[in-house]
Amino acid sequence: MTWLITGGAGYIGAHVVHALRAAGERALVYDDLSTGVPGRLPSDVELVVGSTLDGALLERTLAGRPVTGVVHLAAKKQVAESVERPLHYYRENVEGLRVLLDAVTRAGVRAFVFSSSAAVYGMPDVDLVTEDTPCVPMSPYGETKLAGEWLVRATGRATGLATASLRYFNVAGAGAPALADTGVSNLVPMVFERLASGDAPRIFGDDYPTPDGTCVRDYIHVADLAEAHVATAQRLAGAAPGTDLTLNIGRGVGVSVREMIDVIGRETGLDVPAVVQGRRAGDPARVVAAAGRVGAELGWSAKRDVADMVTSAWAARPRS
Ligand code: WQD
């Protein structure tokens, strides 16, 4: 089967491309290269450079190739930037998705996997977040992901497109150095950057109602996340028209910021002298997935732990 991966030259997208190929699937990438890096792709994977807002290019791309399904990762993903530039986020993440779905449904594609986020839950007041926990996003970014899910689901209902929305929890690690996360906007790369520049890593608040006072998250290795996409794509390809899945993609294991920093110290052999600062606006105390539904639906579960995430990210870190 052939899969079109939008955002396939990005950090997560490229892992999805490699995982699909390892599973014997064919892949074609559509990416505007705003943050994507062509060097992450296997040399024989075709790359179409374009925006998901370009309906004519999408139509031409889909017309010429036997695409079974689309895995849609192309999107803007910075929470703070989305607060500054909501119109940009709605245009890229919601209008871009609408244009893509229009082209996809006209081309007779059968399956659509949508990259969603735990950001749709906002500040969940539960130990484990199930897919039925109310969605109350706290940022324009989270809103665009929730609106995207609605758009995907409604299109599936109306046209028979088989769809899945995958709600990613906190992604970390690298499947290979060439696939590394080059952004510095999440905990692990931010700690690495501070260590590289000789500054103490920061802990944003240690007065949360958690066991050690720091925020608790559900970290998942990007290679596990990529394999979840393969399982989803293969499931949708054989599913009844109109099938609609909404799945948390996490491990169901809570890890605090302090615990993560301890793992970084242990795995790198470095002294990691973190300093505690004030809380970062908008951070929920605890966001951990209930990961049972994805296991039941796909037979998938994460295989890698936080030590694997840290060692692989460390091996792939930028060196100057
Ligand atoms: C994790 C924890 C920080 C850096 C965000 C988005 C989410 C998703 C993933 C896209 C928090 C703390 C961080 C540092 C720290 N994005 N921290 N010191 O905020 O859980 O999730 O990224 O899909 O939608 O909201 O991830 O990695 O930024 O932070 O103490 O130097 O680490 O306060 O508690 P977050 P994160």
Image (tube, rainbow, N blue to C red):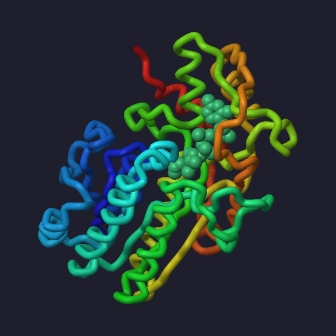
Can residue 97 be seen?
yes
Along the horizontal axis of the image, is 59 left or right of 316? left
Nearer the observer, 23 or 267: 267
Q: Quadrant for the C terminus, please.
A: top left
x, y (%) of residue 38? 26, 40
Q: Quadrant of residue 61?
A: bottom left
Nearer the observer, 292 or 274: 274
Nearer the observer, 96 or 239: 96
Q: Quadrant of residue 173?
A: top right
Can residue 118 be seen?
no
x, y (%) of residue 318? 43, 23
Q: Quadrant of ligand 1?
A: top right
Along the horizontal axis of the image, is 269 left or right of 246? right
Q: Quadrant of residue 215?
A: top right
- Residue depicted at x 49% and y 54%: 141
Q: Is residue 38 above or below residue 273?
A: below
Q: Quadrant for the N terminus, please.
A: bottom left
Along the horizontal axis of the image, is 226 left or right of 46? right
- Residue depicted at x 51% and y 47%: 79
Residue furthest to the top in view is: 198
x, y (%) of residue 295? 64, 68
Number of callouts in the render?
0
- Residue depicted at x 58% and y 17%: 195
Along the horizontal axis of the image, is 236 left or right of 132? left
- Residue depicted at x 74% and y 50%: 286
x, y (%) of residue 35? 33, 41
Q: Is residue 106 above or below residue 317?
A: below
